[in-house]
Structure formats: structure tokens, C-alpha cells
Amino acid sequence: MTRRIGRRLIAAAALVLATAVTGATASAAELKGPGYEKAMLCSACHGFNGASRSDAVPVLAGMPAWYFKKAMEDYAAGRRVSPEMEPFSKEVRLLGVDALANFFAALTREASPVRADRAAAERGRAGSAKCAVCHGPEGLGDAAKRVPPLAGQPPGYLRNQMLLFKADKRSPGDPALKQLKAVMQEFSEAQLADLAQYYSSLR
Amino acid sequence: MATLTRRQFLGQAGAVAAAAGLGACATTAGDIGPKSGRRVVVVGGGWAGATAAKYVRLIDPSIEVVLLEPNPRFVSCPFSNLVLSGVRGLGSLTFRYDGLRNHGVTLRHEPALAIDPAARRVRVEAGSIEYDRLIVAPGVDFQLEQVQGMAEHQDKVMHAWKAGPQTVQLARELQAMADGGVVVMSVPLPAYRCPPGPYERACQIAWYLKQAKPRSKLIVLDSNPNVISKTGLFRAAFRMYPNLEYRPSSKVVKVDPGVREVTTELGERVKYDVVNVIPPQRAGAIAVQADLVGADRRWCEVDHVTYESAKHKGVHVVGDATIGLPVPKSGTIANSMGKICANAVVQLLNGRPAPPVPPVNTCYSWVSDSEVMAVVNAYKIENGKVVQVEQKLTPGHSALYAQHAVGWADSIWADILA
């Protein structure tokens, strides 16, 4: 162990290589549209214009306004437990939730740059029939039934949310989610991870 | 503050040049690249300044932006405590400024030597750069004179509080230390950059010693009567490290590398094999030279909506150099301030009022190689002032929050630079 750390430390000390940060931000990128001056606060974690680069943080670009608003309500009320999002949902409420919801909804939906594991995604596709009943064959959801889109969200985020549903830790006791949580019980953690890879891979 | 005379302006320039080891060159020189349209100059390309430069261009590409930053590369302070434990290399925290050039920011890798708010000019070595609005993001500098022996032994006593060569040297010293050696680190009184940072560092050093030098120990000499950030969480994390001895109310006032000893305010002497003194801090030198600091001679008071200096019109200050907002000197806050100030500057240059937008804060701390905890702050603007709405801590440290921390870092580095 000592030697391993020692080697890493030497590598750390010797290797002052500059890493180029490459992101979703194109050179011609612009920040505009009503509410941008508020929505830009979110980019520290959710990426420029809501195009998350992170495995654990959801993409906001193109998120339906109704779902964004529901998420803010759920975080603020503690139905979704997040030490990060609980305070921020309250800040968003004070800023005016409609402005932010409409800003992100107006953007083109961006798929996560986190690359899906192809084999896992294929296994997930094969087991996705029950999910497709509500979320649709392309994972785009159904606003009329208040079913959110899943396509292109980061796999880590989708997996984490499914695990929370399975353990009844997200919106516990919500009757509208009873059926969803029953479906989650039918899948193992490994199968949920495969489903996450599949829905993340959809465009 | 009255406007500076030309002589004062040049004198200031000479003083900063001398301080920077450039030699005083207070020759008169004309404007460099006369302005054709509206121009914003940003002094300092750290978390706040680089963000501000990029966001001015994103919000209004018709405005020219010049960024003055002496360092050729951006090195992230957040996560740099992981270099001390060998968990990350400094290379993984070092980034090029190319992304900003792609946004049309003109980069000049040199220091600002003086500021003349009345003439709206920043002085650099070859002349002056005219601006319509100036954003100053000078970060912090160290009050080395507060710790006797520190100024004359900067090569032997690392602060490692600006990520870079000092971080690498401190990591080397820890690695070279014999098993059984004693590491001593000091924590200053607030305000200083990154309130939880010293305690995160203590955890990283203790974690490293526990793995690599099991007979060694770390003594943390804290100027404060208790851990000043995430108190309960850090006190709990410290219990993972029997090799970590935490001594509150132990302000280090002297360091003597000859006998490898530090002395506290109470006269207690502590021997070390490796030392890390985090000295008291103030706003970066240019803010002091340009009279942007307040009565405390340390920090800059600003308007909470526009970040315009309380002392000079047309000059805005963002990041760790500011004081008076109920916010920590954190990377996320600096990034927030950079964006909010950029937008305010664009609105003002377009003859519109700046909208009141509060910042956000998230701050992740690594307590081992794989576990993280966090504090999150939400704010609002009330009667023109930033007010905290809520502060929330993670219930403890976990691998899940480490995943969040890595996601935050990748996102925010891109938000600043890509």
C-alpha cells in the first residue's frame, strides 16, 4: 500500500500536465431567453444551459416545465430528499419557479455525454417492456399522464432514482407512484442499472 | 475616495511592479489596443474572474473582454488537498485557458500593475488598457508578517493554499518524511479562503499517514476555539483518525525551520518534521494597491447586486476578495459572483438596471480517499442585500456524495473555462 501511494504521489508531483476542459459549450454559444440570469446559477452543477456533463446530475435542457416544477416542489417539501436540492429548490421558488422551468423547457433536449455501456443498454432494452407502458417506446414520457421523459438522462442519475423508488425513499407513500414502485420490486439492482443504461442511450 | 493623480497612479504601478519582482518601470506609455467599442477588462483568471470573462461574452458578444492573468494555466484549489494524500495528481486539476479564447476573450498572461478608476484604465507593463467597466477578481494574498519567520522562509514553510508548485512540494515533503515523523499544520482565524479547506486537508493528511506512515501523527493547531465549518461533521470525521491530534485555540505566531518548531500565541512550542502554515489572508495585492479594500485594509466591500466596489465607481470586485455578504469564500460562490457580476455589467453597459440575483453555494469536503460530505447554502436578495435562506449539511460522509462532488467539479470547471 505504502509503495503504491508513494508511486502515485511521485506521479502527482512530476506530472503537471495541462488537461483541456472540453464541454458542451460551443464557441458560438450564447446565453439568452427570458430567465437566463436566474437559470445560469444552475450551470455550476447542471452544466451550461442545463446540459449536464455529470453522471449523477440530471439534464435540465428540454425538461418539461411541469416536471421541473414538480421536482422543485418535491425537493422543497422533502418528498425527494437531497441536501443539495432542498435549499436550492427554495431559492428557485423565491426567484420564481416559472421563469426557470420555462427557460429549461424552451431549450433543445440534450442527451448526457456520459457514454452508455452498450451490452448493458441492450440487456436493459430487452427488459424494458413494463417501463415502456407508461414512459413510451422511446422513453419520451407522456405529459398528459404526468409521466416524465427518461431518454438521454445520465445513467447514474437514472439508476440512483430507481433505487430510491425501489426502497420507497422518493415520495414515500405517494399513491400515484404505487404502481411504479411495484414494478421496481421486480427488478434486481443489476437489472435497474441495465435499464438506466438503456434509457440513457436513447436519443 | 478622491480620484488618483497621475503620479499616484504611476507610483502605485511601481510599487506593485516592485512587489512582483519586476522592478519599478513607471515610464509613461500610451494605450495598448485603443478601444473601438465597449470593453470590459477582468483582472484575475481564477474561479470568479474567468467565469466573469466568459459570461460577459456569453450574454453580450458585442462587448470586448480582456482578461489579465499572469499564470499560463488554471489550477483548481478545490480538490487540491487530494494531491497531498496522493489520491489525485495536480495535472488532473490543471486546465488550459483555450476555452475562454474560443468565447472571444482576449487573454493577456501578465499582471495588472495599477488601476486608475477616474481615467478608466488598467496599467500593465507595456502601457495602459482602457475599459468601460472593470471586474477585479484578485483572490487572496497572504499576511506573511503575521507569522514570524514565514516571510524569510517561504521556500521551507509551505502554505500550499494556492494550488500549484507549493502543493506539489508539500506532497513531496509528506512522502519523504520517515514513518514516525510529526506533521504540524496551522489554521488561521477567519476570514480566509475556503473555510472547510484546512479541516479537509487535515483529513487528507491523516488518511495518507494512516495508510503510508502508521507511526506518524498530525497535529492541527487551530487559531479558532473550534472547527469553524461543518463542525459536527468534521469532528465526527476526525474520529476516524486516531493519528490526528486537534488543538483548538492554538494560534501559530512563529515558525523556525532551523529547529523545526512552531510557537503558538500562548508560548507553546511544537516540534515538526513537516510543517504547513496556512497564514492569515487578505484580498490580492492589486486590490490593496488600488484602494479597493475597506477600513480593515484586507477585504473589499461591494454592492450585493452589481458587485460594484463601495470605493470606486465602474470597478467591480468578485470572489474571495469580497467581504460583507453572508457567504463563504468558496469556489461555487466565486463562480456565482462571476456570472451575476458579468450580467450586471452587461446590463449597466446597455443602460438597463442590473436585476437582483442571489448566489448559490455548494461545498464538498473529502474526508478520506473516497468519502465526501457537503454544506449547501441558498440565498435571496432583500432590500438590495444578500440574505441566507437556508443552510443544509449532508447527514454524514459517503461515497454517494463523493460521486456528487466529482460531478460538481467536472461541471463547474467547464462552467468556468470551457
Image (tube, coloured by chain):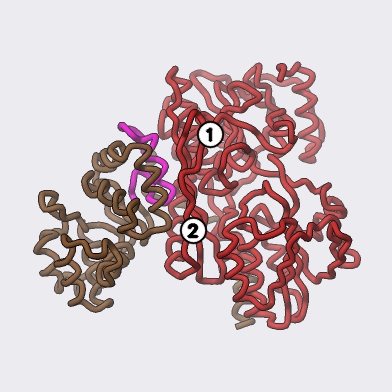
Chain colours: A brown, B red
Image location (x, y in percent) of residue B7: 79, 18
| Identity of the residue drawn at 23% across and 44% down | A65
Image location (x, y in percent) of residue B330: 57, 49
Residue A28, can we see it? no
SS assignment at label 1: strand
Cα gap from disc 2 to disc 1, whole angstroms: 40 Å
Foreground pick, B169 / B225: B225
Q: Which mark is residue B106?
A: 1
The amino acid beneath tag 2 is Leu
Image location (x, y in percent) of residue B198: 66, 59
Q: Is residue B100 left or right of residue A112?
A: right
Foreground pick, A182 / B104: A182
Query: Looking at the image, is mark 2 or mark 1 nearer the viewer?
Result: 2
Question: Magenta part of the protein: which range?
Answer: A29-51
Chain under numbered label 1 = B
Residue B85 falls in image quadrant: bottom right
B112 w.r.t. B182: above or below: above
Main secondary structure along the magenta-highlighted residues? helix
| Quarter containing the C terminus of chain A | bottom left
Labels 2, 1: one chain:
yes
The disc, 2 or 1, on the residue closer to the chain's N-terminal end is 1
Chain under numbered label 2 = B
Residue to which mark 2 is pinned: B393
Residue B316, can we see it? yes
